[in-house]
Image: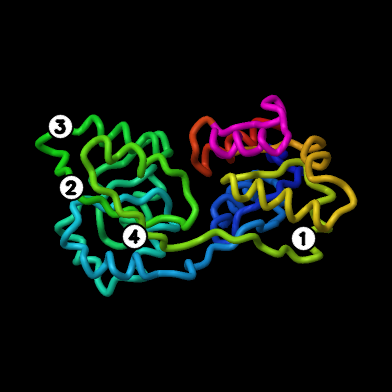
Amino acid sequence: MAKPLEHKTIVLTRTLKQSASMTDALTALGARVVSFPTIEIVPPLDESVIEEAVLELDGYEWIIFTSANAVDYFFKHLNSSTILSSLKIAVVGPATAEAVEAYGIRSDLVAQNFQAEGLVEVFAALPDADAKRGKALIPRALEARDVLTEELPKLGYEVTIAPVYQTVCATPTVDAFTNLDCADGIVFTSPSTARNFVEIFNSHSDDSALHYLKNRKVFSIGPITSDELRTLGLDQNEITEATKSTSSDLVDVIMNSF
C-alpha cells in the first residue's frame, strides 16, 4: 500500500536538532525530507542578565518559558534544578512543558493556544489567591515578541527579561541548495525561518525566493509565522497553516495537502 507522502519531497527549515521528530514522522509517511536549516541557535553575546537572575532566583515568584529552547538554555545556567522548588513555572504549550519535565519539574500553568497571548489569558484568569503576583523571570530569545512584557505588568507582575539564546542566520551547504530544486513543499516554523530563507535564497540564486515559494506548497506552523510569510509577499491562500501550533499537527496538515 502506498504511503500518503510517497514521492513527495518536503523541505524543513529548522535546525537539524529541532527537525528530528518531524523528519521521522514525515519519513514514516513516505516523504523524502530535505534539511535546509535557515537558523542557528546560539548563546547571546551578553549573558550578564541571566547570570544575575540565577543568583537572585529566590526573589522571583514565577519563571515563564515560551519555548523549549529557552528551557534548555536556561538550565545550562543552573547547578541544580532543586533551586526552583519554591517558584511557579508557566509555559506556552505542551512541548515546552515536556522540556521542563525533562529536568524533573512540573509546570504550574500551561497555555494551550501555543502563543504568548495564551499565557496572558491564563494569568488573567487566575484567582487572586492563586496568582502569587510578584516578580516574573522570562528567559527567552534575545529578540522576541513583547506581548508578555507589555501585558503582564498590567496584571500586577514585575517582569524581568533575560536573554538566554539568540537565533542567527545559518549558512546552508551547496548540496542543500541542490536539493531545493525537487521540493514539493517547504515548512516554516517561525518568522525567523521564513525571513532567513528569503535572505539566503536571494543571495545564492538567480531566481527569487518569492517565485520559488509561489511554485510550491508552503506550510506554516501558526498565525505569527503566516503573518511573516504574508509580509514577505505570499498571499494567504498560498499558505497552509497548522490548526494548532504543534509539529504533530503540522505533519497532519502536510499529509492531507497532497
Sequence-first disc among 3 and 2: 3
Q: Nearer the viewer, residue 192 or 27?
A: 192
Q: The residue tagged with tag 4: helix, strand or loop?
A: loop
Is residue 138 within the magenta segment? no
Q: How is the image coloured?
A: rainbow
Q: Amino acid at mark 3?
A: Pro
Q: Amino acid at mark 2?
A: Gly
What's drawn in magenta, residue-wise?
A: 221-242
Residue 250 location, quadrant: top right
Residue named by callout 2 = 134
Residue named by callout 3 = 127
Q: Rounded to the nearest whole Å, what is the CA distance between mark 3 and mark 2?
A: 14 Å
Picture coordinates of residue 61 (x, y %)? 18, 52
Q: Rounded to the nearest whole Å, what is the CA distance between mark 4 and mark 3?
A: 29 Å
The mark lying in front, picked from 4 and 2, is 2
Sequence-first disc among 2 and 1: 2
Residue named by callout 1 = 176
What residue appears at the point 80 percent right and 56 percent down from the top-left corner? 203
Q: Image check: 43 left or right of 195? A: left
Q: Amino acid at mark 4?
A: Ala
